[in-house]
Image: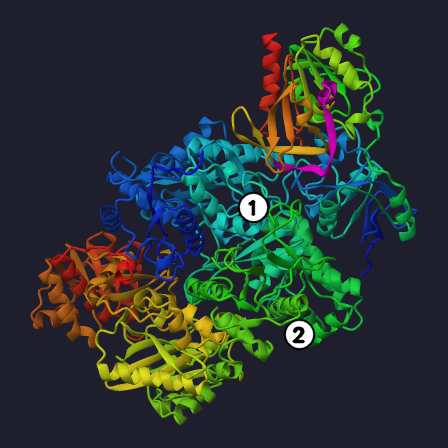
Amino acid sequence: MTRNIKSAALVLKDGSVFEGEAIGAGSSEISAPVIARGEVVFHTGLSGYQEILTDPSYAGQIITFTTPHIGNYGTSAADSESSKIFARGVIVRELARRRSNWRSDDSLDSFLKRNEISGIAGIDTRRLTRVLRDSGAMPGAFGTATESELHKAAQSEKGTAGKNLIAQVTTTKPYVHGSGKFKVVAFDFGIKTTILNCLGEFATVQVVPATTSAAEVIAMAPDGIFLSNGPGDPEMVHGAPETIRELLGTGVPLFGICLGHQLLALALGGKTFKLPFGHHGANHPVRNLATKTVEITSQNHNFCVDADSLATKAEVTHINLNDQTNEGMRVLGANAFSVQYHPEAGPGPHDSRYLFAEFVARMEAK
Amino acid sequence: MPRRNDIKSILVLGSGPIVIGQACEFDYSGTQACRVLRQEGYRVILANSNPATIMTDPDFADRTYIEPLTPDFIEKIIEREKPDAVLPTLGGQTALNLAMELFARGKVGVPGTPELIGANAEAIATAEDRGKFKEAMIEIGLSVPRSGIAHSLPEAQKIIKEIGLPVIIRPAYILGGRGTGIAHTPEEFVSVVSNGLAASPISEVLIETSIVGWKEYELEVMRDRNDNCVIICSIENVDAMGVHTGDSITVAPAMTLSDVEYQKMRNAAFACIRRVGVETGGSNVQFAVNPLTGEQVVIEMNPRVSRSSALASKATGFPIAKIAAKLAVGYTLDEISNDITKKTPASFEPTIDYVVVKIPRWAFEKFPGTSGVLGTQMQSVGEAMAIGRTFTESLQKALRSLEIGRMGLNCDAGETSYAKFSDDELLSQIAIPTPERIFQIGECLRRKISIEKVAKYCKFDPWFLDQMLSIVEEREHLSTASADSLSKSDWIRAKRMGFADAQLAWLWGKSEHEVRAARLKAGVRPTYKAVDTCSAEFSAQTPYHYSTYEDESEIHATTKESVIILGSGPNRIGQGIEFDYCCVHASFALRDAGYETIMLNCNPETVSTDYDTSDKLYFEPLTYEDVMNVIEAETLSSGVAPKVIVGLGGQTPLKLASQLPSNLIAGTNSESIDIAEDREKWSALCESLSIAQPPGGTARNVEQAIEIANRIGYPVLVRPSYVLGGRAMQIVHDQDHLRTAMLEMDQAGSLGREGGLSSERPVLVDRFLEDAIEVDVDAIRDATDEVLIGGVMEHVEQAGVHSGDSACTIPPVTLSKQIVEEIESTITKIARALSVIGLINVQFAVAGTTVYVIEANPRASRTVPFVAKATGVQLVKVASRVMMGATLGQLRSEGLLPEKVKGGHVSVKEAVLPFNRFSEVDTALGPEMRSTGEVMGIDDSFARAFAKAQFAAGTTLPETGLVFVSLNDRDKSGGVEVVNGLTSLGLQIAATTGTAKFLTEHGCTVSRIVGKFSERKSDGKGADDAVKLIEAGEIALVINTPRGYGTRSDGEAIRKAANNCRVSVVTTLSAATAAVQGMIEQRNRPFSVMSLQEFHGRQ
């Protein structure tokens, strides 16, 4: 029996090599050699690969799924978090040969090919995860090119720190989503569809490019302002902290998620730092300090707010119980709050969707 | 909210004997609970009737009551101990039902009585009462199948008019799906509803639209008193709805749910646990999903720790029972640390980077007359679990873990049996769920029948079928290769898909050793990964491993002297929890003595596979390949080969002993094991020691068997060699019957799977010693030649009833001092002759004054835990130290070996049989073991201890009413005393003409004479027969002693009727005599309760 296997390898910046086989774009027998490069991270969620791949926050990154079987339930147009795959590549242990789910309209392999994204399968993803856990998220390259070319590519890759990736993911033109009674202006730093859908349940969302000025926003007379998630290093999103600082003065309720949370912290004069290997998963316990309850949260961030740097400016509302890092805050003296994790889920648990209700309450109180 | 200080003492309710649907998973959960609660400083009082459990070791509780789990006895325990709280959620359905009965009596859960912690009475009622549960689910907006509740057949008929057929019928308050069934036709409907009403203790059934063929899922949920909820594990059933989840092949995590669907299910599970009101602890919520539309419905929830939660704990490394116990005493999830990472809290959801497959193991071959078809009522007796990185790897590992002679998904000798079927025949076979189905599907796929077509018949999700197809395709690819030509990458690919060396050996016509050698030459060895709850996000501190074929291994070198303990694999009749007890005890004792203990087992229900029982845990199949791989990996990582203990896990490890390096075997060597197993060598040894054996011989065919029988005279006992639990053993009274018996063993049908009859596997034909008393002895011999007699057990049932199905007593009640001394000196002689180091069990038959030896097993026996509980000597702890080189003298000075307790108490062990699951089966006891579990009664006399054991086993000893007595001729004279005893107690006697005549002639009063069932007139006229009276509810107890096989027809019908109508049946005169003595005792002096610690005089 013949098998259609095209060998591929993954090389990390530290020189580690993992052998596997090509999947997705460039995996057919006639494909030219491919190289995919980026910062290699791992995600520990058991489901939601399509949402993760299409989450703009993964721009610049290669995603390793720790769950061995990926692609089992195929893909479905309804589950994309944006118009395309923003990740640079995907690493799996086992790609499903056959998809099976009533919602599915395509296979993951074909979905990757349509999006021109390459992947590598068959590697010891647990070994890779242990390397990343111990050494931190690391630049790497994989593909069907020769190992020496992959080594070179891995060496030249810089990672996400000190890079502004927002331009790649933000909308170029404003657009409207939903038709709820409140008017919310949402800064698109790489906004996920599930967030738009959550906001759309109660608001007419005016989505604006990342570089929109405070004056332009104020001119729209919003009931609320939303700061979206997005990829990379918050310190590199030039101009956004200043804009946010101006908007805080208006008293319009402001809600931030993920990168939005980090940018709000920067606007208050706080600091952010890079976590060793980030939080990428759907099982992170977060304590809500007000209610003392624990929420299981969906997370995807490499950078984190230094809560000490905000001691007088904001009150910490949520902390991560695994590593005690900051997960949420309420700004003192302004109508703003934000969380580091993803209350909208998509993928992940819905435990924290009450935060959208809090946003509504703040707008109603206004 | 930390630990509650307002409660000081807690009564933990155990689950009683091992029965189908309730096995050692509750020993696992109960043991965890007891340990945790004691660590937290509570006074723990434990009630459990099962002596084979680890939780009933006197070390695990402050007070251990081995007493019947009936409301009366628990009340007595409560009165005596006055606990502040009762924890009913870790002892299965038994504990939950007990709690509800006690609540109804006003003895728990109401002011002034112990508080129910874990789940209160209202929550239990909401979850367990089908009607209430359905209402509650509708109230919170969850979908449930359309249904109605009926308490009678007419009510049921009304419901069916509304919802239509097919329907599924589930009785309320039952365990393991007992009495549940599916009805497609009006006829089936009547029969299933009637059974269901009979099975429900409150005569209530739920009738609901059949969702057979839908996908089935389970979520394991935990909740704390701060209302934090987490999902520990999702489980997807490979078998669709229609097969009980306990009988389904299941996989974790869920494989074919998108995140959108999974989160919807997760939300529903939380809503369910909140609405039902389980305040703290673990629950399990079951869902069905329409594969075509995604519609999700809630099927049921268990407001307690369950078999699935044990599986989920082993699958994820998250100890649900332990955490549930902590939550029950006030902690919240975020206050408890994750044992495995040590750094992160328990308030998270485990994520796993491997696939877990569980496959049940059945015992239909022991219950002739059963259909072997799986349904909504659980019938399996055990299960194996496997961990691999992919579904294919785990599936094949799980299949070979079952020890049913199969090495994976076909590609072994077993697959040849499908060759005779056409494609159409196979397709119609896979439409019916049976234990064989998975292999039949494999064969269909090998024949290139499309996945769509196969899915149409078996209802497996196409994703699973495609995975199976990839195994089949890989096998086709491998068949074109050979052991020497296979490239390293192809080797790895095959191993990653779970192929065993034995499968490749079969495929290539080589021996397994040749394949292994070729593989090692190619440099292909397994790697061992860790189960860490977090997919490697955090470093794991707990060495819980599984094998797979990857780049990197994670095992740590051992610095201490290490020892591997081979477990006993999936539970089966004849090999169950007793052996897990032995392995766990050895691990504890050797750990205490400074060894590093390494457990190897594949049974997810057990304490042995708890990650903190041993220093290291390998969750692996117990095959030669997998065991050798672990030995080699440990040797490579530490530089020193570990010792291996094969004598504590029953037959499973013992059978491997001869293949393992002999220098590594701890204790009795494999040559001695072989002498005891090999009939001819064994006979020669007995002869040389002048030990009497029943006359007999070894037959390899019918003619030889007849020749032997003619020489020694009938009746004879025939039994195949190398089988467990008296498999296919029969007592034969004449030549015709002997022919039938031999034929049955010869045929592939019943014994084929276990190897059939061959020159390597001869049949033993022995003179059957009628009316002999059987005696079991456990002893330990050390290297200084000292032999310690652990316990001498006299069986209550006479020879001919398998020792595992017979009640027995310590100390013996009828044996003379001289006989006991002779028995003790004989076992000493045998232990010495076999150079036993460690445990030995010998079975004797005492006929008159002659002591015959039946068989010897130089290993731990089923009775060891019972002996330990009866005598206060921890035999296995002692034996495991002896196996590693300690002497009995040394252990005495260490204090590990105290003197046997001589408190004047009597301990009786009684077997528990699963007949309520198999209505078509004759309940008469015989030489083939069929019990699944055991109970123990302890009291100050044999009669009282025996009566307690009967109560514990669920036998009703009535105080009033009509007793039907039917005795074989040999038992008639002994029956006079029994009948007089019964009438003196005020009971009335019914008997058939023959028995009645004899009884009245001997001065007994027979108040009702009944006709023979076999003479029943078709028009229903004539005298009432026993079956009719039983079915009419007029009989309170049946005493029916069958003899031989000729006179069975009437008796069999009577016993079946009694079984189905839940009337207790006593099938031997000896048991009847003991029971009557017990009933007289009960009348004379009410029963009291006492703890094991008090019986042992240690408190």
The residue labelled by disc 2 is B512
Query: Residue B905 lies in what quarter of the image?
Result: bottom left
**Which element carries disc 2, helix, strand or loop?**
helix
Looking at the image, is mark 2 or mark 1 earlier in the sequence?
1
Q: Position of residue B229 (x, y in %)?
A: 51, 35
Q: Which region of the structure is painted magenta?
A: A264-284
Query: Amino acid under label 2?
Result: Glu
Q: Chain of mark 1?
A: B
In-image side of B1070 versus B295 (left or right): left
Residue B409 visible in this rendered orientation of the protein:
yes
In the displayed structure, B332 sits above or below B724; it is above
Q: Nearer the viewer, residue B830 or A161?
A: A161
Is residue B425 among the parts visible in the rendering? no
How many residues crowd around disc 2 within 10 Å: few (fewer than 14), some, or many (20 or more)?
some
Amino acid on which disc 1 is placed: Ile
Nearer to the camera, B760 or B444: B760
Image position of A112 (left or right of B471): right
Q: Is residue B149 magenta?
A: no
Q: Main secondary structure of the magenta part?
A: strand
Magenta stretch encompasses residue A282: yes
Q: Position of residue B418 (x, y in %)?
A: 61, 66
Picture coordinates of residue B551 (x, y %)?
74, 57
Q: Residue furthest left?
A: B1003
In this picture, is B1081 found above or below A32?
below
Chain letter of the residue beneath label 2 in the structure image: B
The residue pinned by badge 1 equals: B235
